[in-house]
Amino acid sequence: MTDNPLLQIQFAAPFDAIRAEHVVPAITILLERARADLRSIAEAQGPRTYANTIAALDRAIEPLDWAMGLVGHLESVATDDALRTAYNEVQPQVAAFYAEIPLDAGLWRAIQGYAASAEVPQLDPAQRRHVEKIVADFRRQGADLDAAGKQRLAALEVELAQKTTTFSQNVLDSTQRYALLLEDPADLAGLPASAIEAARRSAEAKGCSGWRFTLQAPSYLPVLTYLDHAGIREAMYRAHNTRATETAYDNRPLLREILRLRAEKARLLGFAHFADLVLEDRMAESGDEARRFIAELRAKTLPAFEREQAELLAFRRELEGPDARPLAPWDVAYYAEKQRRARYDFDEEALRPYFAADRVLQGLFDIVERLYGVVVRRNATMPTWHPAVQVFDAYDADGSSLGAFYVDIHPRESKRDGAWMHGLVTGEVTPSGGTTPHLALICANVTPPLGDAPAMLTHREVETLFHEFGHLMHHLLSRVGVKSLGGTNVAWDFVELPSQIMENWCWEREALDLFARHHETGATIPEAVFEGLRRARTFRAASAMMRQLGFATVDLALHMTDPEATADPVEVARAIAEQHSPTPLFPEYAMIAGFTHLFAHPVGYAAGYYSYKWAEVLEADAFTRFREHGIFSREVGSAFRRQVLAPGGTADPMALYTSFMGRPPRVEPLLERCGLLESAP
């Protein structure tokens, strides 16, 4: 068993050595070790100290966290039947273990005893906050329940872990099983050449002739945006928005079960509903406050949203005559793109030749070097989970190591959809004042390369990479003496600030000129094209805003009501989505069945989807300081690094924000950026 790569934390994660047969034996041993370490903390004699109680608690579970992080990541990016079976076998055991920790009476007595000791007021601020958070987390996770309550809570956690894992796997399987094969070239009318060639190669890879389209974003989105054939657009739209409703992968029963389990957990812990349980330690603090925030933004957005829909229908009738049908959901992106071209003389596809993926990544590296002094170099020796994955080392301006990170940005059939950052190892400040290295990864599903040509991205895909890289900087630039408070271990409605603020550099000429160069000529984006991009930034901004507000409203509605007393969650979600949709939705619309943000994790973004908009208010406001002093101001970048990125979760997030801005956040910069300020009541 000594050769099991999951048993010992290694900075260079052994992705190339991990096999399905390692999972169950390693996790079994790590669970035994963690339980023994926790018993030692609870039963220790002598004076309680921070080191032998609070820090020891973190150390006890770190090896298990690390191993499960690797296995869970592999299951999402390089899954196969054997790995999935092994992961599904250990996942309930691990969930049960984590649920047991705050329910351990001896451990809880030890923590309470130390929290009341004379040493705590003498701790440094990060350690003191650590103690306070652990005490609060234990209480919120059932430490004060009676024996029967603890037993039921532990069972709920296991059930939630199992059902949310199944939900995620159903979405992956349902997405991957769908493919539309076209054989008539006439059916491809309207599609960009890049999408046609990608579809041809997809079919060729499956041994077929013709053009193959899937529900992965780089394949699906061009169809909805450009394809002239309305029937094919409809077929793809319906397939995408009924994912995970087929008999073999039907998530609809799981939705109600997950909601029921979450509601029961909240009530058991003394909360009115799951939203209040989740949000108690976030900036919003309650479901009502999150709902108020979303309602306020909706009211400010609605007039412009209604105007945009009227303008889009009028535009269609200009093209097709006064008797043109009302827009269907699968028509919106198609006619909006035509309207954008007509209004701004701007075609997003015209930007692709300027966004070669490798250049975009280098542009990110150049930008963070200017802002934060971070130097990135390729690492060709660390093992990865797939040949397409790249590894990079990050260094501070003084040459000291910040850590390393993996980059995996293109879709594969064994990889789940979406984009994300995941921290694998969180470094910490050492007694000498240095920092041990961090390790993290970013994943996405942007347009892949075709043959020997470089991968050419859309501007939206560039934004996605900048977003995830912002999360990565939050992790790599953490300077915290408490690992569990480092990096992105912050309030969920604060964690998107570092990611979303990075997107702003995608819209600045000075930044784009660093990397947005024609892959054949090296020329920068022509001024006319750039101006079209900037003018088009606010095009249908109210519709984009309403889409996100709709997701947040669905989320809060499902997690603030009794699932036993309400209608089918798919119907609830559809009705709310329709109130935020440019068009009526078809009766079978079931996007919620594939909404992994809310249901692929015991918590995840559940009751927290509003945080995207909450953080967007913060980042739009914070970016005004960069705009005022220069978007590459090292002074402002250093302040953001020092006051927002480096502290992690060691201080109240609003205190961190106001330390950077010198005042509370304002909503007006976001509304102004979206062109909605004049529309707001």
Image (spheres, rainbow, N blue to C red):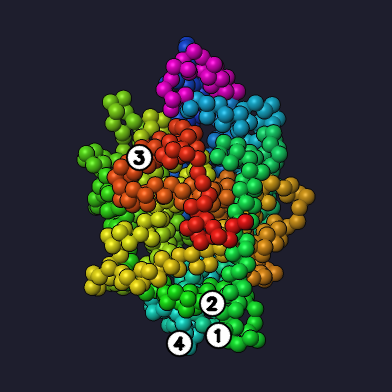
Q: Residue furthest top?
A: 46
In magenta segment, residue 275:
no
Q: Where is mark 4, residue-wise?
A: 185
Q: Are marks 1 and 2 in contact (CB under 8 Å)?
A: yes
Closer to the chain start, of discs 1 and 2, is 1
In magenta segment, residue 118:
yes
Calculate the distance from the C-alpha at mark 3 to the C-alpha at mark 4.
55 Å
Q: Where is mark 3, residue-wise?
A: 639
The main secondary structure of the magenta stretch is helix
Q: Where is mark 2, residue-wise?
A: 335
Indicate which disc residue 319 carries: 1
Where does residue 489 sit, x and y in percent of width and height? 46, 39
* Residue 518 showing in the rendered view: yes
Where does residue 281 sit, x and y in percent of width and height? 57, 36
In the rendered image, the quadrant that contains the N terminus is top left
Q: Give the range drawn in magenta.
A: 105-128
> Is residue 502 or residue 280 the one in the foreground?
502
Indicate which disc residue 164 carries: none
Where does residue 403 sit, x and y in percent of width and height? 30, 42
Amino acid type of the residue tagged 1 in the rendering: Leu
> Is residue 629 or residue 177 the one in the foreground?
629
Calculate the distance from the C-alpha at mark 2 to the C-alpha at mark 4.
22 Å
Closer to the chain start, of discs 3 and 2, is 2
Calculate the distance from the C-alpha at mark 1 to the C-alpha at mark 2.
10 Å
Amino acid type of the residue tagged 2 in the rendering: Tyr
In the rendered image, the quadrant that contains the C terminus is bottom right
Q: Which numbered mark, 2 or 4, is in the foreground of this view? A: 2
**Picture residue at 35% right of the left edge, 40% below the top:** 639
Element marked by disc 1: helix
Calculate the distance from the C-alpha at mark 1 to the C-alpha at mark 4.
24 Å
Q: Which numbered mark, 3 or 2, is in the foreground of this view? A: 3
